Image (cartoon, rainbow, N blue to C red):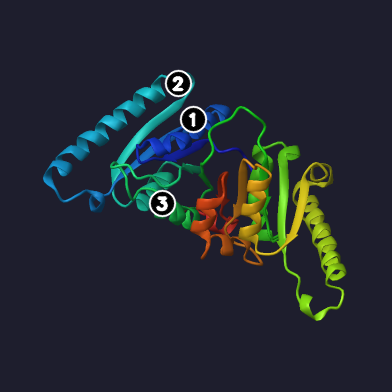
Amino acid sequence: MDKPDHLLLATDFSARCDRAQDRAVQLALQWDARLTAVHAVDATDVPNDLPSRQGRPNAVERAKRLLEEEFAATEGLRASVHVEHGKPKNVIFHVATKQHCDLIVTGIAGNEPLGQSFLGSTVTALTRSAKVPVLVVKKRVLETNERVVVASDLSEVSRPALDLALSLFDPRDLTLFHAFDVPFRNWTEDKKTYEQALRDVAFEECERFLAAVAGANVAAKIAVVAQRGDPAILVADYAADQDVDLVIAGTHGRTGVMNVVLGSVASNLLDEVPCDIMIVPSKGARSAD
């Protein structure tokens, strides 16, 4: 899997998007990729009072012009700013498809007047339905080696997440994280021994999965963590405890690792995990509309 060559930055033009913007610019320069910043003007988000209706278009145009000037002042950056009317999710998907963007970058929910509904629920919608990977940025850009966790249920459809991680990062900076179940635990007398046996099996399955995807030599450089319990909770706790910079995960899987993450606890994970999160669709979901 190749590095992305056209990034889409979803922005509401608020200060809360600064981290996502900085990250998108950094990645575009690092990968020699094009960058398109997209802002959706949603009529339903405009207050009913006339002054606000008159002032909003001017504010959007000023913000667009300032961002264009900022991009132009960044040496080596190939970037443009696109403003379109419509629902944020629809606008983002439309532009991403039309311009063949292969990574969407966005930030966390903002509360600025230029885009109260642009992020928040839109981020969850993007991570559920996007045909390309979505990077949700929370951390400030740092000039250090990244600590990256790939959350996986070891299924075939979870391979794209690991493939992308391997194309973007040194394998020595990667940790494969796998959450496993312990069936019939309460039926055994020696629960500790039983759980450890299943942990050993899970660890071996992780190693086989890595070898199958990356090859034995590369797989040997990737750390493995196998823990019992709910995957969403475990990933969030591990990311916080280990000061992880980025969690990469797929949207579909055999045991529902990301169905859980992107289902009822999606908002909690996106809110509570202190690091950036990249959601990678399965190969079937990546086909263009």
Sooner in the amino-acid sequence: mark 1 or mark 3: 1
Q: Please tell me how crowded label 3 is: few (under 14), some (14-19), or many (20+) other residues with Cα within 10 Å.
A: some
Disc on res. 25: 1
Question: For the point 66% across and 67% down, which residue is it?
Answer: 255
Mark before the other along the chain sequence, 3 or 2 = 2
Return the residue at label 3: 120
Depth order, front residue of 105/188:
188
Q: Is residue 104 among what the camera can see? A: yes
Residue 71: x and y in percent read 41, 25
Looking at marks 1 and 2 on the same chain, the residue that comes earlier in the sequence is marked by: 1
Q: Residue at x 24, y 34 (%)?
A: 59
Q: Nearer the viewer, mark 3 or mark 2?
A: 3
Which image quadrant is residue 81 in?
top left
Q: Is residue 258 above or below residue 98?
A: below
Label 2 is placed on what type of residue? Thr
In the rendered structure, find residue 74 and report the number of the disc placed on it.
2
- Residue 33: x percent and y percent? 52, 31
Q: Amino acid at mark 3?
A: Gly
